[in-house]
Amino acid sequence: MSRSVSSLSLSTGEINSLLSLFPKGIVAVDLETTGLSPLVDKIIEIAAVKITSEGAVSSFHTLINPLIDVPEFTIQFHGLTNDHLKLAPTIKKPLKEFWDFVGRHPLIAHNSSFDLGYLIKSSHDFQITFPPLDVFDSCRWARAALKPLPNPPENFKLSTLSEYSEFTLNHHVAIEDTYACLKIMAKIAALGINQKTPMEKSFVFRLSQFDKSECFNFSTRLKELPQMVQDKNLLTLEYKGSSIRESKRPVRPIGLMPLPKGPVLFAECLLTGMNKSFLLKKIKSFSKLEASYWKPGKI
């Protein structure tokens, strides 16, 4: 299966635009995975494109053998099967090589909490150290920079923003998604608007904020939660410090993620329609909610 990078490039103008935002350079990263939960799912592809402060461009790419079956529901997106991955290396060596490639450059990705969540969790599992880098989110940046404009994009998905940036994207091919991320950022920089607020809003975390014992550990009382998330069950959460009146909240799980403040369940709240992060240590109880039973106002 070809995952070629030969047809992808950045123009001199795009490089200069990116360096106006990131004068010390930048690394864009994208992954393909076996699911949407960095705390339990596995990486199957890593791609990154680096621009140095001198404007040199280089790329990193590898497939990864996850040593588990790749679920069918993810294959429909990235097209990678176990047959494609069986001769690929397992994660440890490529992960070390990835961090060596990144060096001291800040990182950016589209919805970067997910991508970096996998890299941080895998590094923790193999006791691989990573540098104390700043991490930015191109989705947040685009929303902050473009939404106030007279004709903003319809939404801030990578595919929509690629079209807005006049880049033909072969989505869910990791190396193409990294170039898309950079081309979107170059397009935003070229608009000539003040980027101070978008930069502030796009900052996600600094890698040094992760305390290993705090960010990855599940309480034994939540041991059934990962499988329920994997099975895409609707859930009812009883949540400490809830901002809504109801003592219990119906949610549609998206994934389990490490964050500096502790591991979270990222989910759509069915009461508000908003995606939220629920700290695992604040989940008092949870139970499966039958889809046929759920309707607004009824829990």
Image: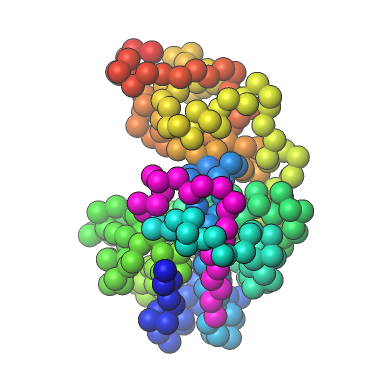
Q: Is residue 233 left or right of residue 239?
A: left
| Residue drawn 57% across the image and 65% down it | 88
Percent of width and height locating residue 124: 71, 50
Which residue corresponds to the image point at 33% horizontal and 66% vertical from the top-left?
A: 170
35 relative to 170, above or below: above
Q: Give the image quarter of residue 103.
A: bottom right
Against 69, is 196 above or below? below
**Which colour assignment does the render follow?**
rainbow
Indicate the quadrant where residue 270 lies. Answer: top left
70 magenta-colored = yes
Residue 70 percent across, percent down from the top left:
48, 49
**Segment tinted magenta in the rendering:** 58-77
Instruction: Report whether residue 37 is seen.
Output: yes
Question: From the viewer's perspective, is residue 189 above or below residue 117?
Answer: below
Can residue 142 be seen here? The reply is: no
Q: Quadrant of residue 251?
A: top left
Instruction: Identify the residue shown where x is 35% and y is 51%.
Output: 76
Q: Residue at x 38, y 81 (%)?
A: 7
| Front residue of this view, candidates 65 and 120 | 65
The quadrant of the picture occupied by the N terminus is: bottom left
x then y, percent, for residue 144: 40, 55
